[in-house]
Image (cartoon, helix red, strand yellow):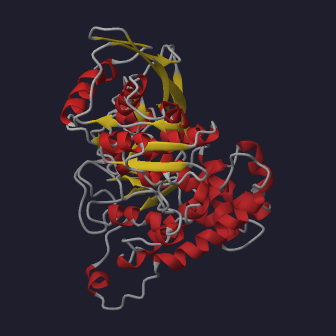
């Protein structure tokens, strides 16, 4: 008997429906699988046969041919186990109404005791199932919350294969999920464990990070050990605008493909904060591998990527970020296919100013010398530094400030309200410009029009570039940051004070910075 069931393959952040065709006929005990399966898929028959034995299901002692269609797409992973198993039972006539299985996309890895293990990419599979008109999606119970985000699709979670067999036999009817993961979305999006009010002092750094958040600018913090760089960076997501539902779904889809969601995470409502160690490889950071997976920069999509101790990262690792920082996506190319992963993130980096860490320290003396300082800074290439809009020096907080009992620090919520107001101005400004949502994404051909400055501003910028030996690459960045400062000030025009503050945030561009 011939039966067709349906599964799905995930490439990039998109899913493609796979037809699992099974024909059971004749006598003998032969199992053949075709359709470009990898080793994990080929091994499924062993898991299926053992699971049948341990759950008292009958594995047919006949010739079984399984075809995974279309045959030119490589099938990877163990998530086809449940699809193949149900199709075998249906083709052997062990289910009452075998035709109803074609109404569902069925995915899940089988354990040897018959239990069903979670899969990767449940959300994009559910989206594709709904788009292709399937009635529902049957999958492991642990993946129900993320799949339930897709409206108009029955989502049925199971714990073991026996439940599904009894469902198709009419013995035990499984009810679709009725919970709505979107109910608590807005509440979760506004809750943060870390707050800016926890940081004593460092008002100038908080101001720089507010500007970075308001314009989506990349920022680098330069300062000695213990100055609070990491503490400040970890609190940045709390002042970013809350994620929209569209952004949350995009981010959840990436984490679903990477297998980073657990059964309690239906929807990622908070902006991601990713902080990889400096020993990370370029593939782990950007994505790829033999079976391409999203890297850290894609997992930080719509959030923050924090690179602590930036000069300690391998140069090759840093250089592969240059293209994603501009294009806001990553293309992983292989011989027979290529996949795209979104990578629109804010880069926040921190670094010591020199190997010993005390260059420009107000109290401790640096033992490195200007040559070693310059050599240390040169580990970061000019093209990468060019993509970082704000450079800010972090100095240690004095003892008196730390010991002070006056803690009237602003809450993150207050800062976030100002950031949201500035982003709303930018949203109106870039309305109609596809793919541009904040000042940091402003293309060069729009800078002169949207960042116009008066004669006094021109003179100030000219003198700053001459006197402070600012590099030419700082020009556009200064104008973009000045535009954001004006937006925070609710000013239509870029004033001289806005420009002066933006010039201040280009420390590493000054040729005299290293002495």
Q: Is residue 171 positioned above or below 322 on the image?
A: below
Q: Is residue 46 positioned above or below 384 on the image?
A: above
228 left or right of 474?
Answer: left
Residue drawn at (29%, 45%) of the image: 277
Q: Is residue 28 positioned above or below 273 on the image?
A: above
Residue drawn at (40%, 44%) of the image: 167
Residue 238 in percent (x, y) is at 46, 68
Observer-nearest of 330 and 381: 330
Residue 124 in percent (x, y) is at 52, 41
Residue 333 seen in the figure: no
Residue 7 in percent (x, y) is at 47, 31
Observer-nearest of 511 and 397: 397
Residue 503 seen in the figure: yes
Residue 403 in percent (x, y) is at 26, 85
Place residue 480 in its image quadrant: bottom right
Number of marks in picture: 0
131 left or right of 272?
Answer: right
Place residue 57 in its image quadrant: top left
Residue drawn at (59%, 64%) of the image: 214
Observer-nearest of 401 and 31: 31
Give the quadrant of the N terminus. Answer: top left
């Amino acid at each position: 008997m011939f039966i067709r069931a349906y599964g799905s393959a995930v490439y990039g952040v998109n899913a493609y429906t796979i037809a699992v065709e099974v024909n059971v006929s004749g006598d003998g005990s032969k199992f053949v699988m075709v359709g470009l399966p990898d080793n994990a898929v080929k091994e499924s028959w062993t898991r299926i046969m053992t699971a049948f034995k341990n759950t008292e299901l009958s594995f047919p002692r006949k010739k079984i041919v399984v075809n995974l269609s279309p045959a030119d797409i490589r099938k990877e992973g163990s998530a086809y186990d449940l699809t193949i198993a149900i199709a075998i039972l249906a083709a052997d006539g062990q289910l009452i109404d075998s035709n109803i299985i074609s109404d569902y996309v069925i995915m899940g890895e089988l354990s040897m005791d018959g239990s069903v293990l979670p899969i990767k990419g449940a959300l994009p599979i559910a989206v594709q199932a709904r788009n292709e008109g399937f009635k529902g999606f049957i999958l492991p119970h642990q993946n129900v919350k993320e799949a339930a985000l897709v409206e108009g699709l029955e989502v049925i979670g199971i714990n073991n294969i026996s439940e599904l067999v009894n469902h198709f036999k009419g013995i035990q009817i499984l009810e679709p999920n009725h919970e709505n993961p979107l109910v608590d979305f807005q509440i979760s999006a506004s809750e943060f464990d870390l707050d800016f009010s926890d940081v004593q002092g460092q008002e100038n750094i908080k101001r720089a990070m507010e500007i970075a958040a308001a314009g989506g600018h990349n920022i680098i913090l330069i300062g000695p050990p213990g100055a609070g760089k990491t503490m400040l960076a970890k609190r940045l997501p709390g002042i970013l605008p809350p994620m929209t539902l569209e952004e949350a779904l995009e981010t959840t889809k990436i984490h679903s493909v990477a297998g980073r969601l657990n059964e309690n995470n239906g929807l990622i409502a908070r902006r991601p904060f990713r902080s990889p160690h400096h020993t990370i490889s370029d593939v782990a950071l950007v994505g790829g591998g033999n079976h391409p997976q999203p890297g850290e920069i894609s997992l930080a999509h719509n959030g923050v990527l924090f690179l602590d101790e930036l000069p300690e990262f391998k140069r090759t690792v840093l250089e592969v970020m240059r293209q994603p920082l501009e294009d806001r996506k990553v293309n992983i190319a292989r011989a027979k296919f290529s996949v795209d992963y979104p990578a629109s993130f804010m880069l926040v980096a921190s670094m010591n100013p020199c190997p010993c860490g005390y260059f420009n320290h107000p109290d401790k003396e640096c033992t490195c010398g200007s040559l070693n300082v310059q050599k240390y800074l040169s580990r970061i290439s000019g093209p990468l530094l060019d993509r970082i809009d704000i450079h800010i020096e972090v100095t240690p907080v004095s003892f008196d400030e730390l010991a002070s009992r006056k803690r009237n620090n602003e809450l993150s919520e207050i800062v976030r309200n100002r950031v949201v107001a500035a982003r709303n101005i930018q949203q109106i400004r870039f309305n109609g410009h596809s793919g541009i949502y904040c000042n940091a994404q402003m293309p060069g051909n729009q800078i002169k029009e949207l960042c116009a400055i008066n004669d006094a501003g021109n003179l100030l910028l000219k003198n700053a570039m001459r006197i402070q030996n600012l590099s030419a690459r700082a020009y556009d960045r200064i104008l973009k940051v000045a535009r954001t400062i004006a937006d925070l000030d609710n000013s239509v025009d870029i004033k001289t004070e806005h420009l002066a503050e933006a010039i201040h945030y280009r420390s590493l561009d000054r040729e005299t910075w290293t002495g």
